Amino acid sequence: MTKRRRKRIVERIKSVLILLLSCSAVYLVVLTQSIAVPSGLLSRPSGGGGILSVADPAETARPLRMAAVIPTGGSEIQRFGVQYSDVNTADLFQQGYTILVEALSSANQPEKVTEAEWRKALTAAPGLYFDWQGEVPLAVLDGWLSVDNPLLTGSVRRMVLAARDGRVFLCYFDEKAEGYYACGSDVVSASRLEEVVETLRDNGARFAFEMEEYSGLEPYTLVMGQPLSPSIYASVDPMGGGQGLSNLQEVLGFPESSASFSGAGEQVIRSRNDTLRIGADGTVTYEPAAEGSDRYRLSGGGIYEAVEGCRDLAQQAVGAVGGEERLFLMSVQETAEGCWEIQFGYSLDGVQVRLGEDGWAARFTVEQGQIAGFQLRMRCYTDTGTTTVVLPERQAMAAMEVKGHENEELLLVYLDTGSEMVTASWAAASDLSV
């Protein structure tokens, strides 16, 4: 073989290697982007005013409460918990975002387990716990996180990623099915989960079933044992000054040129025989034309398209009037094939806001791929810069028991009764039932 021929062969080999390395680099970038936290999506909420930006549906997947069990090498449980704080919950969710996506994507067929096994999962180290405080269909959660796993069905409020025998299992409780479920992951390892939680430190977070002194509470109430000073918020008329109404009309597709008249305590707006009623209390009601309307046609006829289409419209309405409230999914009820009743609530700094007797902030009716009606309770909450003091959890539990609320979940909530200020207080879960 001549020297020139050898040189040509070497150069070809180099070219092939460079091509392979380039392909590998592109593959890794694509793989990373497919599961990494989207840029700017899960950034820490600012401490100042202004609406919490929701740039992507995945932000709605952030729970209101989280906890992590930290490995200690012994039998003692050490747990780090976050609740009633958007900043702290966003931080922990960003830390666990990728592993949650990986676990959901690779989860095997769920199998029913006992409540005792569920409790073991809650105390297993390492572990990562999520609580959305609403009933979230797994198909919707998967959609928000860009996951495609048809094996996951049903609804979930509480979920935990827990390690056992070197593997990671995804465990959850489906309230509608009244059952506990677990499924393994062939992708996520216990060491990966440990990496997510190992830098955290025990801050005293415990479940009520782990402490005798809290036996009067619902077993899965997360107790922090720390003093709380929640902010006081001003509730401002979002339609005041007219600009809020103009912005709202625009995002809801009822232009200012639409026919409009004032009725008994409400303004009525008509466009293409569809009606928008805006009450003096900020309640906005949409009624389609009697012959039907395609004003709010969804991108598909499935449950994810239904929930996401409603979420997007509600979020645009909230953004039109400003404020510091954040939407979270409360419930999804199938009324017929392809038809759902969907409810969203407000939260302020991780604390639920309950409006009226039934609590919801937005309620939608979806029929066969389109929004067939909705009601929005428009609010504009602004932090006043002052705080209030609430009872310690043990005293709040005692007060709840005196009122006959034994073995119920204890929740911090903002009760909005229409006054100019809203303050947080403790409430039993049954007092908040829709």
Image: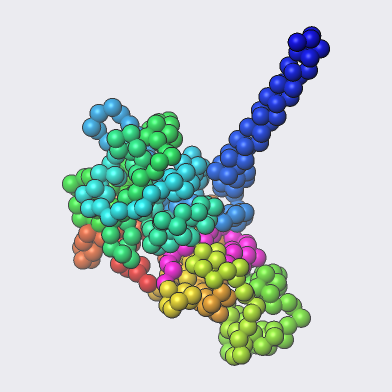
What residue is shown at x 43% (from left), y 39% (from top)?
Answer: 187
Residue 250 visible to the viewer: yes
Residue drawn at (49%, 75%) of the image = 338
Q: Please give the name of the residue rendered at 35% of the width and 69% of the height, measured from the top-left corner.
A: 433
Q: Would you say 77 lies left or right of 233 here?
A: left
Q: Residue furthest front?
A: 1
Which residue is at the far right? Answer: 4
In the image, the segment drawn in magenta is: 309-333
Q: At 67% from the left edge and 88% from the top edge, which residue is drawn?
A: 273
Q: In this rendering, would 137 be left or right of 78?
A: right
User: Which quadrant would the C terminus be assigned to in this image?
Assistant: bottom left
Q: From the image, which quarter does the N terminus lie in?
A: top right
Q: Nearest the camera: 91 or 21?
A: 21
> Could you tell me residue 20's position as x and y percent?
66, 29
Tell whether position 325 is magenta.
yes
* Image position of 329 with respect to 334: above or below: above
Q: Position of residue 85 (x, y in %)?
A: 46, 48
| Spot occupied by residue 431 in the image (x, y as percentages of width and height) | 32, 68
| Model colouring | rainbow
> From what the image shows, is residue 236 above or below residue 125?
below
Q: Check the image and report above or below for 248 versus 93.
A: below
> Is residue 206 a member of the stretch shown in magenta?
no
Q: Is residue 416 toward the left or the right of residue 275 in the image?
A: left
Q: Judge whether residue 69 can be spotted in this image.
A: no
Q: How many marks?
A: 0
Residue 402 on image: x %, y %: 20, 63
